[in-house]
Amino acid sequence: MNGAESLVRSLLASDVEVCFTNPGTSEMHFVAALDHVPGMRSVLALFEGVATGAADGYWRMARKPASTLLHLGPGLANGLANLHNAKKAGSGVVNIVGEHASTHIALDAPLTSDIEGIARPVSHWVHSSTSAVDVGFDAARAVRAARTAPGQVASLILPGDTAWSEGGAVAEPLAPPAPKRPEDELVEQAAQVLAGPDSLLLLGGDAMGEATLELAGRIAAKTGCGLMSEWASARAARGAGRVSVAKVPYPIDLALEALAPYRRIVLLGARAPIGFFAYPGKPARLTHPEAEILELANAGADLPATLDALVQAVGAGGAEARLAKAALPDLPPLGSLTPESLAPVIARAIPENAVVVDESVTTGRRFGPAMAGAAPHDWLNNCGGSIGYGMPVSIGAAIACPDRKVLALISDGSAMYTVQALWTLAREGLDVTVVIFANRAYQILRGELTNVGVQNPGPRAIDMLSLDRPTLGWVEMARGMGVEATRVEDTAEFARALDAGLSTPGPVLIEAVM
Amino acid sequence: MNGAESLVRSLLASDVEVCFTNPGTSEMHFVAALDHVPGMRSVLALFEGVATGAADGYWRMARKPASTLLHLGPGLANGLANLHNAKKAGSGVVNIVGEHASTHIALDAPLTSDIEGIARPVSHWVHSSTSAVDVGFDAARAVRAARTAPGQVASLILPGDTAWSEGGAVAEPLAPPAPKRPEDELVEQAAQVLAGPDSLLLLGGDAMGEATLELAGRIAAKTGCGLMSEWASARAARGAGRVSVAKVPYPIDLALEALAPYRRIVLLGARAPIGFFAYPGKPARLTHPEAEILELANAGADLPATLDALVQAVGAGGAEARLAKAALPDLPPLGSLTPESLAPVIARAIPENAVVVDESVTTGRRFGPAMAGAAPHDWLNNCGGSIGYGMPVSIGAAIACPDRKVLALISDGSAMYTVQALWTLAREGLDVTVVIFANRAYQILRGELTNVGVQNPGPRAIDMLSLDRPTLGWVEMARGMGVEATRVEDTAEFARALDAGLSTPGPVLIEAVM
């Protein structure tokens, strides 16, 4: 067995069964091994950021890692931004990068680069295999690293000769370390904090699932503490029948206002809130200056067990969480598409058990309340802030959950970074409805110009934030990549297109002109 | 003056007058400074790889650096692959990356990453400014680094507070070190080698200009040595009236064959030829095992002066170089589009003084001989091997040379990596004719499967190299980004479309279905 085949067999043995790839010459043996070994689904992307973002989305919904297969340093570089997002989301990814044969590296060929150096800033674990004999075991180690809570980016670099040489062996899966729950004493301390006035339980990571949110809801019902979640959650259970939790807002003034009432804060899978950026004259820490912050459990802890213990500690075993009632907002009157008129249409259209991938940036900033009473769904945010995550994550989510509808809400500026994702959606026939919010600007930056203290930006500055010269034709671009598409300009057209998209299998794009 | 304004003014003082940008919040002060300071042309890209590739193309044609302006680590990451290509091409780039305000970095915000770590693998020079007071001088140092021969990637990282704080000062330009020419003794030694039998003068870098090629041609005429160039040149003068030089072929067997006759090789701006990849059972060094190789001057040396000295040393002062005669191939008969039928149509259409950006990969592999007698032009290759370089480089070339036609020959697979370049072509109204060779496959990898020893690849392996499910609609994608486009399927349609494209100002895309 050559090293390439041992890689594929070892990944399968460790329950990695999807590979998002954009391969090159140095990965040809791995590609060939896909033929010899049944069971690995190989998904081709035309740009590596699509592959890495898809692996992120797959983890979020499948709760196990997919692998990538990327071509040397530049291929890895193209996938780096979405690996950054995956790392910040706590998504486990087995990130496989081909390398020149080991004899060739010293010759400094055109494609030679410092692959480990490129991988390190976005990886928790980096390793280069040195022999075909080791590839299987190295793969098992990479999977273990990827599955280490909350989920890690594990980059495995495979020189060509480790693929084509004989001596490969299939490795047994390696169990990741079990996540821990905090000491009883700390749980007791958190319980006392939450029982006091002006207290907040701030949730993140795995605490955002349906069952864990219900536990948090019981704690809030018993103690009267506030409940909030981080500004972004990798995956949050939302909609009717779930505990509805407001996010820490993105705009700094709103965030300061939302957190101002709380003097005692318990972190459970969340980090202490800080500004997305530094703004001159504004604090970097968003909590009240006198707030005491207790970290009960970080995102890598056993959050369900921690919540169970906390429920007991506050005596909320018999308490009843407040669950969101099914309540759809009224349809907006016929009119133009605005953040306010889009929200109710989307809330009414979200199918039961849908996966909503949110890269709506400024347009969707206030969507939250409207969605609280929608059909139950999972809502996925970008945790790393690098735009271009949405369509790729939708691919991974759709492959992980073939029986669920995926609704991707994406800003036009963001969608362009990984626009090649449309082709993979078409090729794989994935059941994803993509809504592009076409405001034809980097709208967020217009606000940020003022926030960072720029006075009276002139026309040349504004021009750098404008996407209207020329306007982007999303319908044409989508069709060019094989995705059916429609352009809508008012609320009624949008509602019709959204219902049609969500009731048709396969990918559809809706360009919502704002 | 704040740091941002001192940056723009210092870049202008150092003769950097174009900025290719995709900015974010941390760069808003630099964007704002563009309004206050006249003279800097700011070109917006919708993906950072377009910006960095454009800077590469600009250097190649303008012979001075442009700057980029990228958003934090992920923005840099998206531009990394084309910085890799720029580095390998010896292109000078002032690569400016915004960073969080220095007080914010330790907080590990969502977009925080190790920017220096990401920059280092593709940069010759990396520096983070620490104060607004230093920004101007740091910019001058970055330009000096970028202008150090043959041209370097200089990454300057600017925390937000260095932009918005007062205290900025405009820096005087700093002269880069002058490139050196080799000692007389080495020149003499090279002259003796070339005067012997079976000798080859292998050219690269700046030796590929019209005047330097003419000198090399005189040396060949006098000594009888062979003349070849590296497999890729950042910029080579070609066409009628120039010395025509064959490239070392990309396919390893052809390369071995082409270099086999030579036992004595002098390198002048070139590196000793090695395989693009390692192939099992084939040598990595492409020259004859007994060949003696003398490095006369590397790409950073003063190659024109070295050639002058070499002309004298071989006594070729009065020799006459063999110049390519104007000779256009016949038009091919009406028929389908193949590498063989495309070449003569392109050769006949190349306008006088055109810039041809070549990312034609398999399709264009044998274009060389047909172009030798075309109208004089510059031909630009990808020196780093990371595909997605072509359309971005065309943007930079067109901005550097507004009076010259740019013809971009791009494979469909390659074009997808930086497809967002089309929008910038439209926005800036650049005079670029893009030909997409739509063979609907990663054709090169089909060959490489066999080259690396994969026997009988199966359908799933082949499927990973195929772009025909669905086919890419280049006309639709181009129109979606504001570029006029046409699809052609035979030689007559192609000839008509090419002539029309090259005689119309502004960008046009031709999808050549193969």
Image: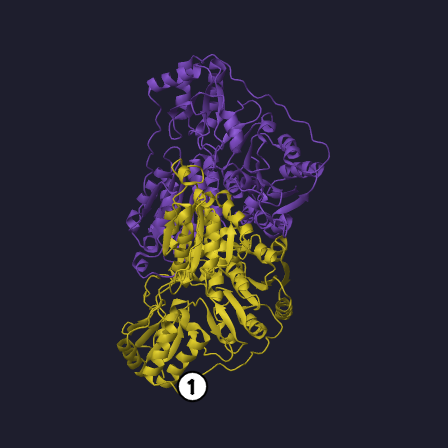
Chain colours: A yellow, B purple
Check the image and report above or below for A346 versus A122: below
Q: List the residue tagged with mark 1.
A: A320
* Nearest the eye: B60 or B173: B60
Q: Please give the chain letter of the residue carrying mark 1.
A: A
* Residue positioned most to the right: B334
Residue A329, compared with residue A425, is above or below; it is below
Name which quarter of the figure residue A257 lies in. Answer: bottom left
Q: Amino acid at mark 1?
A: Glu
Query: Where the C terminus of chain B falls, by quadrant?
Result: top right
Residue B256 on image: x %, y %: 50, 28
Q: How many marks?
A: 1
Q: Is residue A133 left or right of residue B435?
A: left
| Left or right, A122 with reference to A366 | left
The x, y position of residue A113, in whole percent, is 40, 42
Q: Position of residue A190 (x, y in %)?
A: 30, 78
- Specify few, some or many for label 1: CA neighbours under 10 Å numbering under 14, 14-19, or 20 or more: some
Q: Height in image: B119 above or below B190?
A: below
User: Is residue A460 visible from the viewing direction of this image?
Assistant: no
* Position in image of residue B73 (x %, y %): 39, 53
Kind of element beneath mark 1 = loop
Q: Residue at x 38, y 25 (%)?
A: B295
Which residue is rendered at x = 52% and y = 42% of the image?
Answer: B395
Q: Is residue A218 left or right of residue B342?
A: left
Q: Nearer the viewer, residue A280 or B471?
A: B471
Q: Nearer the viewer, residue B406 or A318?
A: A318
**Foreground: A180 or B425?**
A180
Question: Quick check: can you spot residue B89?
Answer: yes
